[in-house]
Image (spheres, grey):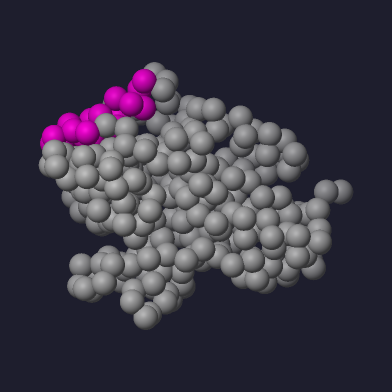
Amino acid sequence: MEPQLKLFTDSAADLPHHLKVEYAVGVVPLTVVFGDNEYKDGVTITSEEFYQKLTSETVFPATNQVNPHDFAEAFRPYLDAGSEILYIGLSHRLSGTLQSAVMAKEMLQTDRIHVFDTHSASLGEALYLVRAAEMARSGLSTTEILKNLEQHKESAFGFVMLEDLQHIVRGGRLSKTQGLIGSILQIKPIIQITREGTVEVSDKVRTTKKALQSMIDKALEQQSDYSNDTLAVAHTNAGDLFYEFVDMVKEQLRPKRLIEGLVGPTIGTHAGPGAIGLFY
């Protein structure tokens, strides 16, 4: 009999609470720093509290990766209980968190920990969790699950409309040159999470409506039919505009399942307020 599989991710996945509960996912938090104050994403600061601070604080936030010790402490009880662990994590090109998970595995000296790099972030990362959980429920082995997740990278995508590029440039996830272009042209930048797990400017559109439509058009360029697929949409406190986009996605892409979520402090630090994303 194979050991029970325990799924883990990090707070950068922005996994909605009901899915954490449904799939019994362990979430290891990254740290958000406002000046001299540190907060554990989703533990000592909520998404709502974060966005309030983002608008009221005079200092810009920063993020710190999960350290290997925190991963080891999270994993150890499940290893002691005989479980196998699959950690599905934030792109290694965006954070050192994934490498910390690898180091934790080495510290614990076990082959029952599997570390998967999604090459994605936010709900793009979370979608891999959902796929893995559903496959585990169907009885697939960990080897089969990992093979399927790796194959999904070939068709996965993530597009995000940002209010501006200042936050993502300040966080070092986009070059200053690309950020300068966006500010000069006064455009709505759309960034893409590439298949390699990096971030680049995909499009520059002059109105919000056109930017939202552009993301849907890009999804349709990837494939024409999503009726059997799960998509995800996320936002950084974008208000009613987000729900307008949700309606656009349902009407034009018609996915079998649509996961909606509020981006948490980790990704929100780099995206800034008012961003809206579409993920597969």
Q: Residue at x 35, y 46 (%)?
A: 174
Q: Is residue 23 left or right of residue 84?
A: left
Outermost residue on the front side: it is 177
Which quarter of the rendered picture does the C terminus lie within?
A: top left
Depicted 76 relative to depicted 177: above or below: below
Q: Position of residue 233 (x, y in %)?
A: 35, 43
Q: Residue at x 33, y 77 (%)?
A: 35
Give yes or no for residue 208 being in the magenta stretch: yes
Against 219, is 82 above or below?
below
Could one spot residue 126 in this view of the protein? no
Nearer to us in this view, 9 or 231 = 9
Can the viewer see residue 217? yes
| As drawn, 259 above or below 22 | above
Left or right of 194 in this view: 108: right
Q: Which residue is more in the foreground, 248 or 69? A: 69
Query: 225 or 108, which is in the foreground?
Result: 108
Q: Position of residue 46 (x, y in %)?
A: 37, 69
Q: Main secondary structure of the magenta part?
A: helix
Q: Is residue 47 left or right of residue 212?
A: right
Residue farthest right in this picture: 1
Q: Which percent across, then down, holds residue 120?
A: 48, 43
Q: Which residues are magenta?
A: 204-221
Q: Could you say where residue 105 lies in the image, as x and y percent from the top left?
A: 73, 59
